[in-house]
Amino acid sequence: MNTALLVIDVQESFRHRPFFTEDDLPAYLAAQNALIEGAAAHGVPVVRIFHRAGPETPDNPFSAASGRVRPLAGLAAFEATATFTKSRHSALVGTGLDVWLTQHGIGRLIVSGIRTEQCCETTTRHASDLGWQVDFVPEATLTWDMQQPDGRPLAAADIVARTATVLTGRFATLCTVDEALARAGAPVAA
């Protein structure tokens, strides 16, 4: 089955949000970069997706005018097979990605990127509902601590665990980087 890797919203915009910290960034980038490099080395299409939304003003980090809708520093440089820009949480809404995947005979998606519980989870659910098989790679997704409605903190690790819990077996197969590459038919990195 033809597989494509989605690299969702791995962009400098997040560095300019008040919740951004570098706490989990090194481990995330190591996993994300290994996934990109493994996929690219073995002919798995790597699809880059940027998020652009809100007013087109320099102070909005998700606007083109800000200059921040570009790859996150530390992300491995790669030649994207295709690039799409979205303005919604799902990478499949209004981008043409679904048409591109269908035209290229892609039946399985590997989902990675930023934020675990938002654009990565939403794209996973949407893709599954549309009939794609989805491999979700929690270690190659990134999020940050949040505040619950009652004011209590919710740790990023708990958000990732919750996302993995609600996706597995219903919307996606949970995979490590090596498992996702093996399932895509790419040899696993040593």
Image (tube, rainbow, N blue to C red):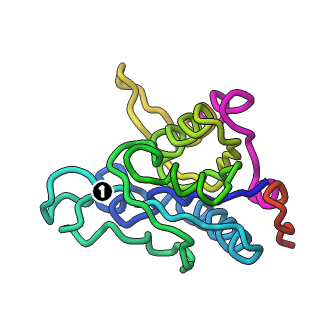
Residue name at image x 23 percent, y 66 percent: 64
Q: Residue at x 54, y 60 (%)?
A: 7
Looking at the image, which residue sits at the far front? 103
Is residue 36 a member of the stretch shown in magenta?
no
Query: Is 75 placed above or below 105 here?
Result: below
170 in relation to 68, above or below: above
Task: Rate crowding at label 1 as few (under 14), some (14 to 19) or many (20 or more) other CA atoms within 10 Å.
Answer: many
Measuring from the top left, give residue 181's x and y in whole percent.
78, 61
Secondary element under disc 1, as helix, strand or loop, is loop
Q: Nearer the viewer, residue 152 or 18?
A: 18
Q: Amino acid at mark 1?
A: Arg
Residue drawn at the location 54% of the way across and 80% of the way down: 77
Judged left or right of residue 135, residue 21 is left
Examine the rendered structure and indicate whether residue 14 appears above or below residue 127. below
Residue at 50% of width from left, 38% of height from top? 122
Question: In this figure, which residue is indicated by the disc labeled 1?
Answer: 52
Q: Which image quadrant is residue 153 in?
A: top left
Q: Nearer the viewer, residue 163 or 9?
A: 9
Total count of labels:
1
Please provide the residue range marked out in magenta: 163-181
What quarter of the picture does the C terminus occupy?
Answer: bottom right
Determine if the magenta segment contains residue 169. yes
Task: Pinpoint residue 67: horizontal percent, then vertical percent.
Answer: 25, 72
User: Is 181 in front, or is 144?
Assistant: 181
